[in-house]
Amino acid sequence: MTFNWVFSGDDNPAMQRTCIDLEYSLRPRIMRFLLSRLDVDTDFSCFHFNVDVDKKWVSISDKTPKEYVSKILTGFDQVINGSSFSSVA
C-alpha cells in the first residue's frame, strides 16, 4: 500500500510529522476496509492512495489496478472519508 501526499506549502518538519501521523491513522482503517472486501491472499502492495492533507481527503489512485478499484469503490468514501462522494483520482 502506497500513499501519495498532496499538500500546499513546503515539506517542512511539521508537515512531515503531519503526514506520518496521518499514515499511522489511515493505514489500519484502509487495511480493515480492504480485508473486508478482498481475499487475504490479495497483493496489497499494488494499492495506491492519494492523500490531500489540506482537504483531509483520501482518494484511490489511478495507479491501483482497475479490477481492485471496482471491488473497493463502493463504500470507500463513506468508510474512509465519512462521505459518499466518489473519490477515484
Image (tube, rainbow, N blue to C red):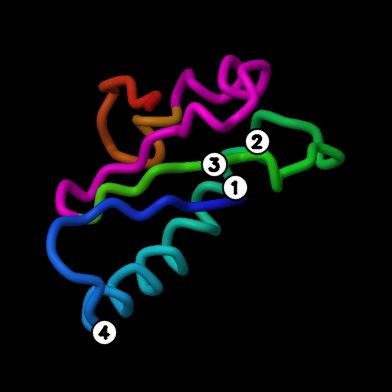
Q: Is residue 37 left or right of residue 72?
A: right
- The residue that mark 4 highlights is 13
Q: CA distance from mark 4 to mark 1?
A: 29 Å
Q: CA distance from mark 3 to mark 2?
A: 17 Å
Which percent across, then down, holds residue 9?
13, 64
Q: CA distance from mark 4 to mark 2?
A: 35 Å
Q: CA distance from mark 3 to mark 4?
A: 24 Å
User: How many residues crowd around disc 4 within 10 Å: few (fewer than 14), some, or many (20 or more)?
Assistant: few
Amino acid type of the residue tagged 4 in the rendering: Pro
Residue drawn 28% across the image and 51% down it? 6
Decide: marks 2, 1 in contact (CB < 8 A)? Answer: yes
Amino acid type of the residue tagged 1 in the rendering: Arg
Earlier residue among tags 4 and 2: 4
- In the image, residue 80 sits, relative to residue 6, either above or below, namely above
- The residue that mark 3 highlights is 48
Decide: marks 3, 2 in contact (CB < 8 A)? Answer: no
User: How many residues crowd around disc 1 within 10 Å: few (fewer than 14), some, or many (20 or more)?
Assistant: few
* Residue closest to the far right: 41
Earlier residue among tags 3 and 4: 4
Name the secondary structure under disc 4. Answer: helix
Please report the bounds of the magenta region as a residue range.
54-75
- In the image, residue 55 sits, relative to residue 21, either above or below, namely above
Amino acid type of the residue tagged 3 in the rendering: His
Residue drawn 42% across the image and 51% down it? 4
Q: Is residue 62 left or right of residue 80?
A: right
- The residue that mark 1 highlights is 32
